[in-house]
Amino acid sequence: MSAAPSPFARSGAVSRRALLAGLSAAALSVTAGRSGPASAQAAPVKLRIGVIPILGAAPIFVADKEGWLKRAGLDATFTIFESGPNMIQALASGTIDVYVAGVAPLIVARSRGIDVRVVTATAVEEMTFVATGRLARHFAPGVSTAEAFRRHRAAAGAPARLATQPAGSVPNTTLQHWLWEVGKVDRADVTVVPMGIDATQQAVLVGAVEGATVREPAVTIIQGRDPGIKLVALGGEMFPGQPGTVVAATGAFLDKHPTQAQGLVDAIVKAVRLIQEEPARAAPHIEAALGKGITDVATIRKALASPASRFVADPRAIVDATAAMQRYQVTLGSLDKELPLDGLFEPGYVLKAAASQ
């Protein structure tokens, strides 16, 4: 008669099966950690973003507030700058990874050996010109731009003071193009005063200048506070196809973190679409980033509907206008010579984002 199986043998068999199952589970866990869902739990990549607080930068704020940057594996922090040229210094010192501002300073940066590349646009033809009451009254129907400035100087006994950002910036270049090339204004009739964005807005409101280049939401804010301030010229009139805000990243970040770089662009393309199709949803995110207690969601919604607001993600839309702006900067002397744009624009990220969405 055969002996009954030992309880210990039965117990041992179960233990071996459990051990094998445990080893298999552990192996699967290791594999998943390498290439499966667990990879989403890896430490996020730190992303230091420099940005000018204007409506054209709204897509980066919307992408952040919607959680899309975090979902792309990015831990984003923001530093506010007053102008693009100032931000170039931060790029050069390695204190920011991403630049969100006008494209013109990037050309100069690359000429100085800074490896930075435009991965997406966000807006075009943002820059406008507004005039305070003293100057605005001369912009009557049928009166040319040059004549309006001439009449102001005759009445005030001094040239009109116009605030804009530093030489080499998109606002400065756009203003001068409008004055000298489009309006054929006599240089004796105006004085261009470079200053930061916030200072420009305040100078207009307190009447320290007669006119200024401003972007949304500043246009809506200052006209709301002083209805006598007149929107005189839109971006397309000042510089046709005027290249606006772009998102550029350092070569070091793009090369080291290609997956996260694509995730950044995916998020921005998605944000541009949200702003275009659901501005009511996007407005609170933008107000949270730009409001600073001086505006509200209703003002942001009005600014989004402004003719000065044109959101575009594809950087190819601004290549020709960027080349034209560079040529004009050489004419102004803010750039020594035309520099090659080869390598500045990398549209592949946007094309891939569009195909996947």
Image: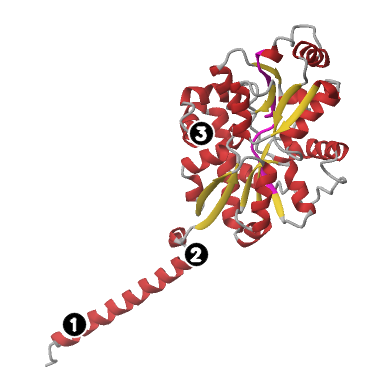
* Range covered by the magenta-colored residues: 118-133
Give the residue type at disc 2.
Answer: Ser
Task: Choose between 229 and 281: the one closer to the eye.
Answer: 229
Q: Horizontal placement of 90 versus 70: left or right?
A: right
Pointer 2 local density, CA inside 10 Å: few below 14, some 14–19, many at least 20? few
Give the residue type at disc 1.
Answer: Ser
Up/down of 55 relative to 79, above or below: above
Pointer 3 local density, CA inside 10 Å: few below 14, some 14–19, many at least 20? many
* N-terminal label among 2 and 3: 2
Pointer 1 local density, CA inside 10 Å: few below 14, some 14–19, many at least 20? few
Q: Which residue is mark 3?
A: 286
Quadrant for the C terminus, please: top right
Q: Quadrant of residue 257?
A: bottom right
- Disc 1 and disc 2: Cα gap in Å? 36 Å
Pair 1/2: label in front:
2
- Disc 2 and disc 3: Cα gap in Å? 36 Å
Pair 2/3: label in front:
3
Element under disc 2? helix
- Disc 3 and disc 1: Cα gap in Å? 64 Å
Q: Which residue is mark 2?
A: 35
Q: Which residue is mark 1?
A: 11
Up/down of 74 relative to 274, above or below: below
Please state the horizontal and vertical placement of residue 109, each as a whole percent of the image.
74, 51
- Count every numbered label the image shows and give the total: 3
The dot on residue 88 is: none
One can see residue 105 in this view: yes
Residue in view at x 57 percent, y 55 percent: 260
Please state the horizontal and vertical placement of residue 9, each as a whole percent of the image.
19, 87
